[in-house]
Amino acid sequence: MKKEQCFHALLIASILPLGSTVMAEEWPINNRWGAAGFTFAEDFDGDGLTDIATAIGSSVYMKFNQHGRFHTEVWDVDNQWGVASHSLSGDFTGDGCPDIVSFVGDKAYIKINKGDRFVSKTWKVDPQWGGGNYTFAGDFNGDGIDDVASMLGGKALMKLSTGRGFRSETWDIDPHWGAGTYTFAADFNGDGLADIATIIGDKVYVKSNTRRGFITKVLPITPQLGGGTYTFADDFNGDGIADILSFSGAKAFMKFNQFIGFINDEWTVPALWGAGVYTFVGEFNGDNRLDVISLSGGKAYVKLNSGSSFY
Ligand SMILES: [Ca+2]
Ligand SMILES: [Ca+2]
Ligand SMILES: [Ca+2]
Ligand SMILES: [Ca+2]
């Protein structure tokens, strides 16, 4: 399968030209929602803009970003789901189209994105798991295919995707953990491999991925943070390494990653929020600066990143 198969919604999206004037803060969106764990933000159609998918039984409501609003399609799936806390999106087949996987025990119920539909499959997986807030998708071995890593004390239970299944390995990792919502998988050192970081008080434990395990570096951080579900790790200033962002009302506490520490900045943000578990990072307007979306009923509060604020 080729990446172009993700492109079917581009024709619809092109009706609204990029760069047209839109009300940035509040975009209408279809008001049917699955549980938070079954709601995902990814570029499902490959047009460069992050979309939203939310699963309810055998239907996945695909809400395609048309830069100012969302166009809804319903894609059928097999109604086999694992637990909400262990459901993740990512490109687990390596074709460039993000998929959805939902785990329970030794079952991986995967919905493979074919660009205009999902194909439902069940893969086997090693049944050892850490908690849901400590279970992440990302490319941990650098083969271009997203994997899953689940943290359990001093063990990282790695489910490495071959594109057709998950192969298990156990890697060693530093056993210090902060709260799950302050624990992240992102590339904190710019080598292309997903790393792990966890905030404990005024310290960040950055656990850098060596492809066989993780090496820990403890860095100071100012503990000025919003709630855990409004806290994210991703590259918000475009230098290739993941930063930490935490929202509290109209404030965005930015911790810019400088490898040897984090530099603080405080940005403003419109104080309109849906629930934290329905708040996601993505590229919502196509300018290559990562934005944030917060969903509430039929409204999507989109916080666009100007480089010095969210508007
Ligand atoms: Ca898209
Ligand atoms: Ca991989
Ligand atoms: Ca890395
Ligand atoms: Ca953007």
Image (cartoon, rainbow, N blue to C red):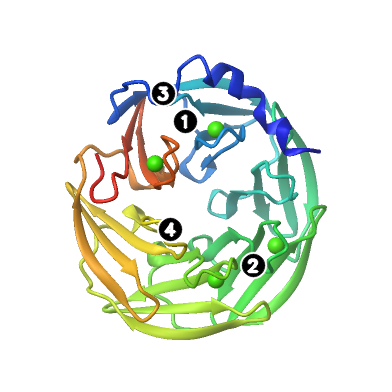
The answer to the question of whether label 2 and label 3 lie on touching residues, with beta carbons closer than 8 A, is: no
Depicted 62 relative to depicted 286: above or below: above
For residue 29, the mark is 3
Residue 199, percent across and down? 36, 73
Depicted 136 relative to depicted 294: above or below: below
- Given the image, on which type of amino acid does mark 4 rest? Asp
Q: Is 285 on the left-hand or right-hand side of 132?
A: left
Q: Is 177 on the left-hand or right-hand side of 24?
A: right
- Given the image, on which type of amino acid does mark 1 rest? Trp
Residue 121, percent across and down? 79, 42
Q: For the C terminus, give its image quadrant.
A: top left
Q: Nearer the viewer, residue 204 or 187?
A: 187
Q: CA distance from mark 1 to mark 3?
A: 10 Å
Residue of label 1: 33
Residue of label 2: 140
Which secondary structure lies at badge 3?
A: loop
- Does the beta carbon of the residue at mark 1 sit less than 8 Å from ligand 1? no
Residue 78 visible? The answer is no
Residue of label 4: 234
**Quadrant containing ligand 4:** top left
Which secondary structure lies at badge 4?
A: strand
- Given the image, on which type of amino acid does mark 3 rest? Ile
Q: Earlier in the sequence, mark 4 or mark 1?
A: 1
- The residue located at (36%, 27%) in the rendering is 297
Q: CA distance from mark 4 to mark 1?
A: 25 Å
Residue 96 visible? The answer is yes
Depicted 172 relative to depicted 43: above or below: below
- Does the beta carbon of the residue at mark 2 sit less than 8 Å from ligand 2? yes
**Which residue is situated farthest in the top direction here?**
15
- The residue located at (48%, 85%) in the rendering is 216
Within 10 angstroms of label 3, few (less than 14), some, or many (20 or more) residues? many
- The residue located at (35%, 63%) in the rendering is 244
